[in-house]
Amino acid sequence: MTRAAVQDCAVAPARTQSVLVVPAMHCAGCMAKVERTLGQIAGVASARVNLTARQVAVVHDPAVTVPDLVASLAHVGFEAQPRAESAEPVSAVRPLLAPLAVAAFACMNVMLLSVSVWSGADGATRALFHWLSAAIGVPAILYAGQPFFASAWRAVRHFSTNMDVPITIGVILATALSFYETVTGGKEAWFDGTLMLLLFLLAGRALDAMMRDRARAGVDALLRQAPGGATVIAADGAAAWLAATDLVPGMVMRVAAGERIAADGTIVRGASRFDQSLLTGESVPVPADAGQAVLTGTLNLDNPVDVRVTACGEDTSLAEIARLMAAAGQGRSRYVRIADRASRLYAPAVHTLAALTLIGWLLAGAGLHHALVIAISVLIITCPCALGLAVPVAQVVAAGALMRRGILVKDGSALERLATVDRALIDKTGTLTYGRAQPDPASLDALGQNEAAIALSLASHSRHPLSLALAQALAARDMRTVPLTDVVETVGSGLSARYGGQLVTLGRPARADGMAAALSIAGEPVRVIRFADHLRPDWCEALARLAAMHVPCAILSGDNAAAVAEIARTTGLPARAVASPADKQAAIAMLQRGGAKVLMVGDGMNDGPALAAADASIAPGTASDVGRQAADFVFTGDSLLALPRAIAVARATMRVVWQNFALAIGYNLLAVPLAMAGLVTPLVAAVAMSTSSLVVIANSLRLARTPR
């Protein structure tokens, strides 16, 4: 068992963790079966499925080998393999697209032929239309039904069952009986109903798979923040570039200004400032010199430094954040436990109803053909299509409505969780605030016309964030540049130039709290231009709406205490500063243990584990890649009104979902007795099933109207 073949790490002194990829898992029933099977193996302490990633993490004794785990899953119909670190993620939706397209195309064409039969076509015309329907329908059904046929076969050949078994039986029997009716010149064939059944089932499964594909990329985006390697300095002074996977503790990396650090380490030579905003949320660059620790993914801003590696690969702080996010993602499986219990009961119940119907009609003296037609009608009419669409259709409609208001829904199931939140934790930098420095208007007002022009001219020569913000603010005041000569930018100090023979500089002030720049013109007093990170628009109304919705808020930030305290005073929110990624995750876990449903709002890499661990999470569009990937929702505008608006839509969505469930269950309570009584043909059963699905869809479309 190699490191490339399976991820093993010491979980306890006598136990190992192995991660297996199980591509065939697609529902709560599959997840429960995998966990039960592995949990019954002697020596297995726990098995946790991450349904989004289609993986299972197994904690087991060393005596239990990976082949043992794989063989146990194979025995119940699930092919598995150890997770390879370099393996590409398996798309959940891609295998469904072609079957869905084929089912849709064939269904439209066969329905056109069926309209003529329904309209009274008889004799040779009806027979021709039935043969044309068979020519289109049979190949399309065999192809489009493959996802269900394969799943059902895996279950049956291991003497088990799942929700796809009754679907497969109904589809195959309806197709076979329709073909028999076509060959014998019968009056009815049900290719259209069978294709419609597959179309709606595939649509519901594809919608669910699409959401899962979007939700699983957070850890990958996080790990991409680390550079691919570093320049390593040997004892004899020789320099060589090594890939990050080849770094080992004790090596010395030379990190240039503008370069990210490839491994955790301690500075041995040099001093610089480091941008740790992606890791800690700290908005102000942090100075560090010899003897101080620096972290993977941190950006070196000013000067080259030599860093001795202390942790690399999976031992770095960045990898630890990735593990926290992955563990939080596995915890989300609790939201499908109800569906799991339903799936265990569905297949046996449908089989029993169809078998009792067949036997009952045979005992009543009906012929085998007639009894079989009625049993098929029961199988079709009990198809869980409306129940299957109750959630994903409502989610998609709500997601579209939110998108039109600038809120992107990345995980449809998060609408359910967002509807229940009763606490909100909000990061400061980039979330409550813009996350970018802006000059204080009072500082700009204090500049004279000539001073402002010189400041604009100097700032326009630099790509430093403060210079860019200053240039943008002065340009917005219709200032114009003046000619400068001998412009020089010194990393860590600032800009210098000559204007009319006089030395002018724009750089770091000798002493200032927070973010500031000093403008110096020979013979004139130094002007200090202060910068601040301003609150987002509508913050007051947004917080008031959240309070009215019984969602109290608090600030949870990795930024420094002074900056957080200032925002806390302005907003009146309780606040915690200097919180690490693990601190944020622990704060959420503590609230959840107390029964709270937590909404996390954050933007940085340091917020990734918290965003993944919270019951629901939202990130601004300006967030880091990790923040956007880990969050369930992303709002693209500046206004914080996106928060109460998203919660309002989520709560409305859940009301519609419960209405959809009531409609679907009511349909079954009415339709199943009629089918068992022989009052429904397979075609009528398919139409009734489709009608119930359309009613669910129509009810969901009411969510297209979003609150302001």
Image (cartoon, grey):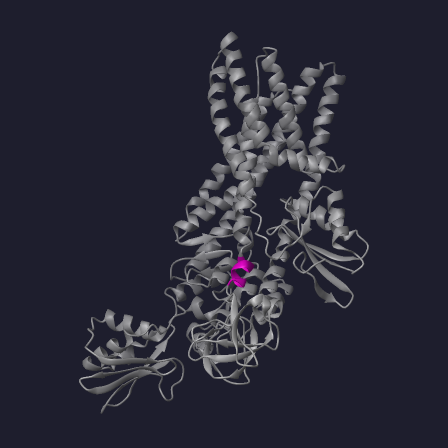
Which image quarter: residue 684? top right
User: Is residue 5 at least partly visible in the picture?
Assistant: yes
Magenta segment's dominant SS is: helix
Left or right of residue 122, residue 401 in this image: left
Of residues 350 and 249, which is closer to you in this image?
Answer: 249
Judged left or right of residue 690, residue 163 is: right
- Left or right? Give the position of 345 relative to 471: right
Identity of the residue drawn at 62% across and 52% down: 335
Compared to 115, does 158 lie above or below? below
98 vs 17: above or below:
above
Give percent across and percent down for residue 478: 20, 70
- List the single residue furthest toward the top: 123
Magenta stretch contains residue 220: yes
Judging depth in this view, the residue of 697 and 585 nearest the camera is 585
Residue 677 makes an appearance in the image: no
- Label tally: 0
Q: 254 or 291, which is in the foreground?
A: 254
Is residue 26 positioned above or below 361 on the image?
A: below
Residue at the image position 32 percent from the left and 77 percent from the top:
440
Residue 705 x %, y %: 41, 46
Residue 467, position as x, y percentages in the image: 32, 75
Q: Quadrant of residue 434?
A: bottom left
Give coordinates of residue 682: x percent, y percent.
Answer: 60, 22
- Magenta highlight range: 218-224
Q: Is residue 700 above or below residue 140?
A: below
Quarter of the image for the N terminus: give it. Answer: bottom right
